[in-house]
Image: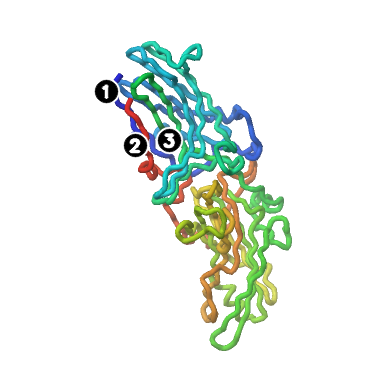
Amino acid sequence: MTGTSTSLTEASAQHPFEVLPDYADIRTDVPPSLPSSAPDAASVNQFTTLHAFYLRTGKGRPWLTLNLRSRATSAKYLPLYCDRDVITGEVLLDLPAPERLKGITFTFRGSVQWTGLDEEFFLQQVVNLWSPPHGAATGDLAAGAHKFAIDFLIPTEISSSQSSVENPRLPPSFTERASPVYVNYQLSISMRRAGLSPNRKLITNIGYLPRQVAGRPSLMRSLAYESGTPLLGPDEDPPGWHVLQPVTITGNLFNDRTATVEYSLAIASPLSYVANSPIPLFLTLKSVDKHALDLFGSSQHDVRLMRVLAHAHDAADMRSSNTFLTMTGSAVFWPHHAKNTQGTRAMYGELHIPKGTKQSFTFGKISLILWFRGCSNSPQYQLMLMSPTVAGFSQPKASAAPLTSQTITVTVAAPKDVIIRSLLPPQYSDVHENPNFNLTTGLLENGNWRFVHVHTAG
């Protein structure tokens, strides 16, 4: 049989990767840490989108068809699956003549591709769809129509036989424009032919998104979200805040005298947040110098959310050549006058995690970190409190390094039945955002195709 195939590059044009701005269709009532041998019925019912991929004859007639159902919002996108999902579908053959075959297989593969390095497959599972009868090496498949069902449970971990890391969880798909690394998942149907006849293979990429759920806020913060009232601070709601160690800033005020101001930053606890949601902050300033305190209290405060993508085992192995930092967002603060006392100024703050921010993950030597600026030894996002710029105040040894930092985790879903809302006053809502078009949580349309070389004519 001669013919042509839909190559992987052609498949990408017909079925681009989907940008995933929201996750409302992802169930969050099943804790992601609990393994499951099969998905729940409600999860299966969400697979409403049908995808079709083909190998065609020289005259353009499909002779091998792969039909899949997935969570993707439209068939124009590639299939999308979550952890514990079952990939369901069928393979349809329309053979004009009998074929002598060694077998027909379905293969699920995951790989990592660093720029300039060979593609490394960390997962490969093969399922036989058809084998020669009676254990023979080859067998004949009659001309005409044939159908083979696909029912494959996506593993959540990699077995120790396939990885040097003991039972690591599968990472999410990761493709970004100009990224130094890509994490890809592929499905393929292979017809292994007898003799010297070339094998036939149909390959398509898919999107994989583990369901990682944010931590549940404290009772008092949940009640504030429900009622739309201001959050209670660290003194009134200790379980709801993680208070960092205070830091002091000493400098020269108007070239007249030395002044010292103490910064204390509190971050809403637990330190796990869903993308496209606010991170509540509480900033306390203390000083015996009232003039300095007033100046600092009316100045802009620089708290940043940093993402670190590292190709390193640990902090000691992180260098400029293998660590890539991106500023993801910045905080907005407004005064909390009720907490102001002599020698103290208090401020509420929020830092909005942009829509589409990738979830935190670590896999092998890949770390995706969000960073409130400071440490680089943990594979998370981090919040960083930077030195402020205050008119009339100068520091003799000002540094670009952060004053303090805290690792956080970004997830794809909020806890069940939790309302999360911004409490930013309207007059502070028109703030500058830091758009980054590479931070879409979905999958880049064509960013990784140059690394894919394996497709065969059908």
Assign a secondary structure to mark 3. strand
**Considering only vertical position in the picture, is 50 above or below 261?**
above
Q: Is residue 290 left or right of residue 49?
A: right
Give x and y (percent) for residue 278. Answer: 57, 54
Disc 1 residue type (three-letter): Gly
Q: How crowded is mark 1: few (under 14 residues within 10 Å), some or many (20 or more)?
A: few
Give x and y (percent) for residue 106. Answer: 47, 26
**Considering only vertical position in the picture, is 429 above or below 18?**
below
User: From the image, which quarter does the C terminus lie in?
Assistant: top left
**Considering only vertical position in the picture, is 290 above or below 339?**
below
What residue sits right under mark 1 in the picture? 58
What residue sits right under mark 2 in the picture? 9
Disc 2 residue type (three-letter): Thr
- Which mark is first along the chain, 2 or 3? 2
What residue sits right under mark 3 in the picture? 205
Q: How crowded is mark 2: few (under 14 residues within 10 Å), some or many (20 or more)?
A: some
**Considering only vertical position in the picture, is 233 above or below 139?**
below
Distance (Cα) linking label 2 and label 1: 18 Å
- Which mark is first along the chain, 1 or 2? 2
Distance (Cα) linking label 3 and label 2: 10 Å
User: From the image, which quarter does the N terminus lie in?
Assistant: top left
Give the image quarter of residue 156: top right
